Image (cartoon, rainbow, N blue to C red):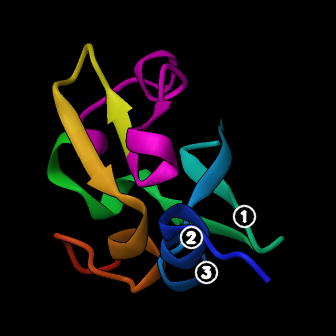
Amino acid sequence: MNTSTVDLWTSVEPVALRVWVEKRTIYVELHDGRVVGFPADRFRILAKATEEQLAKVRIELNGYALRWEELDEDLTVPGVVAGRFELAPK
């Protein structure tokens, strides 16, 4: 069996394959089939964003990060999966 560095990395760290926004909740489909969702209001910059701005999210760094260019906001996928949020739930 031949295992590359990328295969080993993706088996340890969660990696995003797809991201979308519904009603101010951001959903991320991970490489292992899980789908995680979190409220935009758990992050300072995202809490102030419009729904249109939230919808402009992109996957960056080979699935390791989420990026909102217009908001100049980046979140790591492992951080989101681990529940490392900036703000307490309302």
- Out of 62 and 26, give the one closest to the viewer: 62
* Residue 31, numbered circle: 1
Q: Is residue 90 visible?
A: no
Q: Is residue 8 magenta?
A: no
Does the magenta segment cover residue 47?
A: yes
Q: CA distance from mark 1 to mark 2?
A: 8 Å
| Residue where numbered disc 2 is placed | 10
Identify the residue at image location x=48%, y=60%: 39
Q: Earlier in the sequence, mark 1 or mark 3?
A: 3
Q: Which residues are magenta?
A: 46-65
Q: Nearer the viewer, residue 66 or 11?
A: 11
* Marks 1,2: beta carbons within 8 A: yes
Q: Locate residue 8: give its quadrant.
A: bottom right
- Residue 66 screen position, x and y as percent: 40, 43
Q: Earlier in the sequence, mark 1 or mark 2?
A: 2
Task: Name the amino acid type tagged 1.
Answer: His
- Residue 89 position, x and y percent, is 34, 78
Characterize the local packing of mark 2: few (<14), some (14-19) or many (20 or more) Cα atoms within 10 angstroms.
some
- SS type, badge 2: helix
Structural distance between the alpha carbons of marks 2 and 3: 4 Å
Marks 2 and 3: CB-CB under 8 Å? yes
Q: Tell me if 28 is positioned left or right of 77 in this view.
A: right
Identify the disc placed on residue 11: 3
Image-based side of 88 in relation to 34, left or right: left
Distance (Cα) linking label 1 and label 3? 9 Å
Q: Nearer the viewer, mark 1 or mark 3?
A: 3
Indicate the position of residue 54 as horizontal and vertical percent values: 45, 29
Q: Amino acid at mark 3?
A: Ser
10 to the left or right of 83: right
